[in-house]
Image (cartoon, helix red, strand yellow):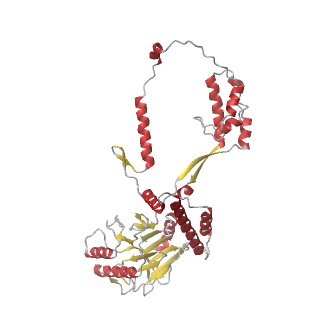
Amino acid sequence: MKFGYLNIGRKLIKKIAVIEDILIRKRYDILSIAEIDLDCFSSPPSIQGFTSVVKRNSDGLARICLYIRSNLPFDFQTMDGNFPGICIQLAQCTLAVAYGEFTENAYSMDKRRISEKERCNRVIDFLDQVAFSSKKNLCIMGDMNIDWFSNTISKKRLVSWCTDHDCSQLITSKTRKATQTCLDLAICHIPHLQTKSDVFESSISDHQGKQVSFGRDKEKAPKLTVMKWNFTTHVRDFARAHKLDIDTLNNLSTEEIATEIINWLSDINNMCTNKLTMSSRRAHNPWYNKDLSSLRADYIASTDSSRITKRNKYTRAVRKAKTTHVRNLAKSLKGGVWSVIKRNTKSQVKQSPVHISPDKCSTTDIETANAFKAEFEGKVKRLQKTAQPSNLVHVLPEATQIWDLTTCTPKSVADAIDRLKPTGSSGPDNISGRLTLIYNKLL
């Protein structure tokens, strides 16, 4: 879930194109716009794929609105008074936006300047209403017009409210460059979800926009890179059209002939080889099967009222599969269920840092293994010495036997190739055994 807030400083109609660009480019689920100042005859411009929610005071003036994705279900929470604030209830979270205005009944004959004390009282009253009806997770964003960097009574009262309700203020950088103050705040209580906050430049306001992202910390499935080998008819026709010129090999040495043959086979082998990157989710989650994958695809693809039913069905199936896997694992392993619990606990503990250099520590097993490999290879290279075979001549015994070396014939080479296993690993030249067997007659 990505939640944004921006004080645009009036002229919503002229700035709606930039706001729509921010919505789409930053992929917000909810974006709140403050100080829109729309009269009773005007409404926020529509944006495709989003629903607008607006709060009006008693005379119809709207000073704040929010855009929420059309496929995101929510309930509108009615708030007392004319304070420009909106509260919505999501499935597991309560979201609220507020604007601590300086002027009461703006753009009217009876407008009145609001003192700092009264402004703080209105903000805290709104926060109390939201906290009273909030769910376990709570996020409140808004231009409170209370400087978080100052040491005023209003700021101290706001800090006390956050402490009493176990909330944290996430914005720590200045949100208004002209005054170098932090007026736009994000007050959150999201205990069991990963939360990130940031500010962004909108180019249409003197206020910095702010955003809060929260949700479960999803570990990315590791990617595996595999080489797929396939000898197609296209490769066969190419090889026949670009045969190796045997006549040019007659005047070459043995090493040069081998090099020419290897280069030609390497070109053919590269055409047969395709690099694929795939997710190792099945290896990471052994209980995840094709049935769960089809249920998930069916749930994601549905857009009608059956989406919730399919989601619940998929969730139940996932829980059942995980429970069954752990139960079977406990029965099969020595030590029973306690061995499984101990193993799962150990797998979640992060590796302690290991010094791989004077100014760097490793955080993963792979980084530690690579550092050990580099150190070992470097040590081998440092200990290498230049070979001096001439020093060994005087200690070698005299040769009393003459070796009888048999001549290498084409048949012996063909027999050696026939004994190759097509599923064996390729050598340093990366030419597979299957390709060598295919071109046996030519070789």
Name of the residue lying farthest toward the front: 334
Up the image or down, 415 lies above or below 277; here it is above
Q: Position of residue 16 (x, y in %)?
A: 50, 71
Give the mark count.
Answer: 0
Residue 48 appears anywhere in the view: no
Among the 4 quarters of the image, the one containing residue 271: top right
Q: Nearer the viewer, residue 139 or 151?
A: 139
Q: Nearer the viewer, residue 4 or 427?
A: 427
Q: Position of residue 186 (x, y in %)?
A: 38, 70
Up the image or down, 57 lies above or below 14; here it is below
Q: Position of residue 101 (x, y in %)?
A: 36, 78
Q: Nearer the viewer, residue 145 or 238?
A: 238
At 48% from the left and 59% from the top, the residue drawn is 219
Q: Position of residue 218 (x, y in %)?
A: 48, 62
Q: Quadrant of the C terminus?
A: top right
At 67% from the left and 22% from the top, the residue drawn is 408
Up the image or down, 285 lies above or below 362; here it is below
At 28% from the left and 80% from the top, the residue drawn is 117
Residue 150 appears anywhere in the view: yes
